[in-house]
Image (cartoon, rainbow, N blue to C red):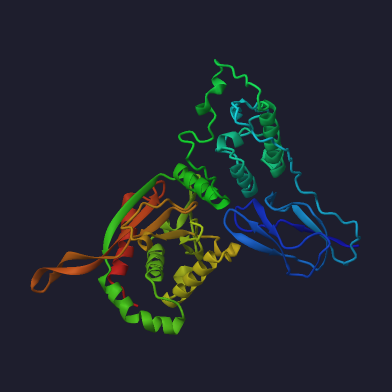
Amino acid sequence: MSIFEIKMPKLGESITEGTITSWSAKVGDTIKEDDILLEVNTAKVSAEIPSPVSGKIVQIFFQTGDVVPIGKVIATVDTDGNGTDNTTEAAPPEKTETSVPEPTATTTAAPASIPVTAQAAKSETERWYSPIVLQIAQEAKISNEELAHIKGTGYQGRLSKKDINEYIGQKKKSISATTPVAGTKAEVPISSPAATPSQHSSTPDNAENEIRPMDYVRRLIADHMVMSKNVSPHVTSVIEVDVTKLVQWRNKNKDAFFRREGVKLTFMPVIAEASAKALAEYPLVNSSVDGYNIILKKHIHIGFAVSLPDGNLIVPVVHDADHSNLNGLAVAMDTLALKARDNKLLPEDIAGGTFTITNFGTFKSLFGTPIINQPQVAILGVGYIEKKPAVIETPEGDAIAIRHKMYLSLSYDHRVIDGALGGQFLRRVGDILENWQS
């Protein structure tokens, strides 16, 4: 029997672990090379992991919901296909089931009297929970504060499915132990502060409030945004751009473009092309910071924010955007956006971005102050295009005309980019759009 170890693969830059969301095979199954084994969710992308070999699955070491470090062995395969019948799957965390008697009408003991035997592990802001743990906690109505005090036995002290199930089992036992039998008078210390319901409500303000734990992706977005604000001193500059020529050009060419390229002609590829040209002229905006060193990037990789059906965001990247024409940018951005919404992005589709564009105009917002996508040093916000009366210069003198106007906002890292450079870069993007020629 020849055993091959399948390890948790690296699914992108700076990724150190992944959460197993589902297995497509089980112990004893015969698989072929490139058959899908499991699906993994990481900080940046969900990916289906194919088997690198053919054979029979001998053992599976991690279950759905487990967080696994990169490089850890997750399964073994007998490549000879002669695995013995006594192969076993690693046992999933045991569930603790405790029957809980229904409380009677005379029950007055509050769940708050349950002795909390778990020791505090890490602070809530430092602790990470897998999706399955958050789901169990939500179903059991366990607050985030209570979760933070449950001792974890998983990797690096994390809370595992077994830990939270055991805690819930102990909690149910405590409730049943303090619930008086029907007809028995409950003894509640009158002077005990533990008898005050408001102190033990899982919802701090109102019992009718709903507590909704963040999903895995939203937690990562939250951490990334907070980190960016802590790392970079943000400054935002805003300009108004007259894009009347651009709007007229698009209206004239969009139907022919769709017939030729098979994708809709939106304003985003145009803005990406203008940004790529400006980045080539102002390379400091296409950089990152390492301590007191500025790293000027040799390639212009433009990311653009895509809103997902579940309400989260992801930023696919068009690599070497300055080497693509408008047609290539339009096709690439449309393809990446579709893959993002279908959860089909590959790790390389989201890696290596050097500058990001986010389109507030999709939701008819005039402008915003976006947060820098670390380790980049700038992000461009695109506002809604609306018709406005404006004063224009004509050979006969000034006149008022209806123009298409749009706000552009640039948030930048003041450690590297000062107001003058930020303003010059932003104005250059605006000038290209105002005088658009393709």
Q: How many labels does the image show?
A: 0
Q: Position of residue 127 (x, y in %)?
A: 60, 39
Does residue 328 lie above or below 240 as drawn? below
Q: Is residue 177 left or right of residue 31?
A: left
**Residue drawn at point x = 65 percent, y = 53 percent:** 18
Q: Residue furthest front?
A: 183
Image quadrant for the N terminus? Answer: bottom right
Does residue 40 lie above or below 212 as drawn? below
Q: On the image, which quarter does residue 3 sit in?
A: bottom right
Between 278 and 218, the one lying in front of the other is: 218
Q: Which residue lies furthest to the top in this view?
A: 191
Residue 253: tell me if it is visible. Answer: yes
Q: Where is residue 229 in the image (x, y as percent from the top left)?
A: 44, 44
Q: Is residue 151 left or right of residue 383?
A: right
Residue 292: tell me if it is visible. Answer: no
Q: Where is residue 79 in the image (x, y as percent from the top left)?
A: 85, 66
Image quadrant for the C terminus? Answer: bottom left
Q: On the image, which quarter does residue 256 sit in?
A: bottom left
**Residue drawn at point x = 37 percent, y = 67 percent:** 271
**Residue drawn at point x = 59 percent, y = 27 percent:** 110
Q: Is residue 33 left or right of residue 281?
A: right
Q: Position of residue 94 (x, y in %)?
A: 76, 44
Does residue 124 lie above or below 381 as drawn? above
Q: In this view, does 27 lie to the left or right of 84?
A: left
